[in-house]
Amino acid sequence: MPIMVKPSKSRTSSQHPGTARGGTGFSASMDEAPDSRLHLADHFLIAMPSMLDPVFGGTVVYICEHNADGALGIIVNKATDMTMDVLLERIDLGADPVAGRIAVDKKPVMFGGPVQVERGFVLHSPHGDYSSMMKVNERVALTTSKDVLEEVAAGRGPERILVTLGCAGWSAGQLEEEIVRNGWLTVRAEPSVIFDLPAEQRFTAAMKLLGIDPMMLTGDAGHA
């Protein structure tokens, strides 16, 4: 069962970055090599100053999947005003909190992107065998099924976890085009940026992976 939360308004125009023209989701060909020199799964996209889109300006996006059909990612540094205990209650998992949840309950739920904002996406350390889990690598997995949050509610969930509402998606060639237009910097992701730092520190930390001081960044810079 997917993680479904009360629907809210979202931007779905394909003219916005990170909004695939045909919607998004796990592709039917996850194992195919991308039809491109770029292979950005397990990379961060860091928004350039030229990214004036109100949804993606100032964001760090973790790319979970990138192949010939397009890309799927999760914004990791835009917190909502909802915390995990509230989310668990809304999906009928919040009753009788257990001791193992104390560290999780007050974590913020993130805004993962403008696509499918009524649906939950969970980035976590590989753990268990959930019904809709995609293992990005040995350190990060993405799950969209409710069973992962059932484990969290019972205090048995993954050790490292970040929960978002919505995701970002790009159709074939769309992300590459945005990078060529200097919309994004790219760098190999570091899980500690996602899981161990407060949301407000993740942009600076991602930039430092490139050896760049965000204060020195201009809209004319290229991509890495």
Image: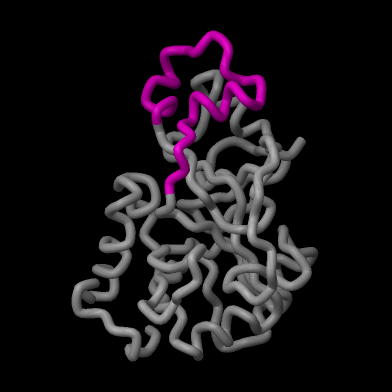
Q: Does the magenta stretch include residue 93?
A: yes
State which quadrant residue 96 falls in. Answer: top right
Q: Is residue 176 magenta?
A: no
Residue for point 34% across, 85% down: 219
- The coloring applied to the image is one colour
Hey, which residue is sitting farthest top in the picture? 96
- Which of 186 and 79 lies nearest the eye of the viewer? 79
- Quadrant the N terminus occupies: top right
Q: In this view, does 156 lie above or below 160?
A: above
Expressed as whole percent of the image width and height from the top left, the position of residue 22 reads 78, 69
Expressed as whole percent of the image width and height from the top left, the position of residue 157 reads 52, 29
The residues colored magenta run 79-106
Q: Is residue 18 left or right of residue 192?
A: right
Q: In this view, does 57 lie above or below 96?
A: below
Expressed as whole percent of the image width and height from the top left, the position of residue 145 reads 69, 39
Q: What is the total number of numbered labels drawn onto the structure image?
A: 0
- Quadrant the C terminus occupies: bottom left
Residue for point 28% across, 75% down: 210
Q: Is residue 165 left or right of residue 1?
A: left
Residue for point 69% across, 73% down: 14
Q: In this view, does 183 lie above or below 74?
A: below
Expressed as whole percent of the image width and height from the top left, the position of residue 137 reads 52, 58
Residue for point 64% across, 81% down: 174
